[in-house]
Image: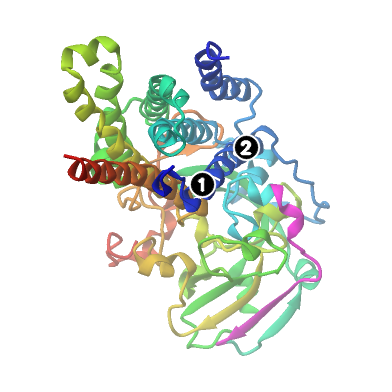
Amino acid sequence: MRSSEVTPKWLYVRRREFLKLGAGSALALSLPAFARAKVEHGPKLAGVTANAQYALPEEKKNSFEDITTYNNFYELGTDKSDPSDNAGKLQTRPWTVSVEGEVGKPRKWDIEEILKSFPIEERVYRLRCVEAWSMVIPWDGFPLADFLKKHDPTSRAKYVAFESVVQPQMPGVKGYAGIPFPYLEGLRIDEATHPLTLLVVGLYGEALPNPDGAPIRLIVPWKYGFKSAKSIVKIKLQETQPPTTWNQYGGGVEYGFYANVNPDVDHPRWSQARERRIGELLRRKTLMFNGYSEVASLYAGLDLRKFY
Amino acid sequence: MKKALVPTAFAACCVPLLWLALQAATSGLGANPVEELLNDLGYTAFVLLALTLACTPLQIVFGWNWPIRIRKLLGDFCFFYACVHMLTYVVIDQGLDLKAVATDVLKHKFIFLGMATWLLLLPLAVTSTRGWQRSLGFRRWKRLHRLVYLAGGLASFHFLLRFKTPRVETIAWMGVICVLLLVRVVAAARRRAGMVQSP
């Protein structure tokens, strides 16, 4: 036998890897969908009042199961089912949120203090993901404006930066998620203090489940979901526009800083004109600012095609 | 044993379809079943395309002839899953809004690559029969069916763009497709060198 007829070792090893990979990924792809993780209900929150102004009676709310098993939370894994499968890998106690930067009264809060200090209201909001799906979710929280006011922002506070938690045992942090951590988000101060913008601590009247960003997260309902940072540990007020994770990604070609829901501005890889409401088969039209037209005045004179 | 090969491969190719039907019936497809269906069908078609492309290299490297006997079957099933995948996108995902589909194909390279792959597979599936092989002549038939290499390349880019960040899995699959094509290139170069050496 000529030596050229012998299978080269690299090819032989590759083939084995290939077979293993094939079988492995076929399993990985089908199993999570088959066994949808059950996410535990949190303890009931005390003294939650429903805010009738934001009740969205015309919309059908998504189920607890849908809201807790279909998530983007890369620290817990990049698949939609990973955050619920790995929910236990996020430790939510002890938990502190530090407020710093351009404020007269910086402070490091314990989460229990936050829960006691602000009256919690229920608001039903539409949530529109940049991936063109949406849900209707009853959040429990309080306006971010009320929280920020306690810290006396200075006149130089033009932007608010949010930082999400990084814990070494989180699978996305340990492995490869494709984005750097900590996850960073940011808003202009007028966006942050808009009455629609919430700090959320609960879902369906119960403490926020881990896949949804326990114990405290941001909700900005007129922006794509990724702007609403999860599991927040730091809030910094500053004069300059903060770098944000997806705006930095790929040299800024992927997402703009604003990321307002806008049916007329496509994502590089898909159209944003329509969306699939989770629970519905066919797509519906996406509304400008996700239907929250009251925020339009924030962007008067701004070219939303350029600042998307 | 030899007789069992084709029926066994046929049955194996039906498993993903039955599995998806079972999951759909038991709401095992999760919160966004359309997305899950698209992902699973596309992935199955891609794996079958890779398997189809693996038949010749397996013969070249290991001298196995049995993969060649199921190559047509694998290719046909690949096209079948690609059709269901594409139709799920057009009919269910896009609600048969053909204008939206056309815009999507032209504006977004992710969709363009998927549709281009399907279009490449179409003539190959149509002419995969012995009758077509005969009426085209083997040489021309073979030349036409080399389009499958391009389909493999386009499909792996389509798969890569499916995710917001490049994933280890999709990059590994690109590597697999590259190896499968490379084996052919090396074999062809060797054949040519051999021909030159022995007049």
Residues B170 and A96: in front is B170
Residue B186 % position (x, y): 31, 46
User: In the figure, B65 relative to B6: above or below?
Assistant: below
- Residue located 25% across and 9% down the image: B131
- Residue located 51% across and 66% down the image: A194
Amino acid type at image mark 2: Leu
Q: Is residue A116 visible?
A: yes
Say which quadrant the N terminus of chain A sits in: top left
Residue B79 % position (x, y): 37, 24
Dot 1: element: helix
A173 to the left or right of B153: right
Residues A79 and A190: in front is A79
Q: Which circle's residue, 2 or 1, is located before the other in the chain?
A: 1
Residue A91 lies in the magenta-colored region: yes
Q: Residue at label 1?
A: A12
Which of the 4 image quadrants contains residue B76?
A: top left
Q: Is residue A272 visible?
A: no
- Residue located 61% across and 46% down the image: A137
Tell me the magenta residue range: A85-102
Amino acid type at image mark 1: Tyr
Residues packed near mark 2 inside 10 Å, few (<14), some (14 to 19) or many (20 plus): few
The chain to which mark 1 is attached is: A
Dot 2: element: helix
Q: Residue at label 2?
A: A27
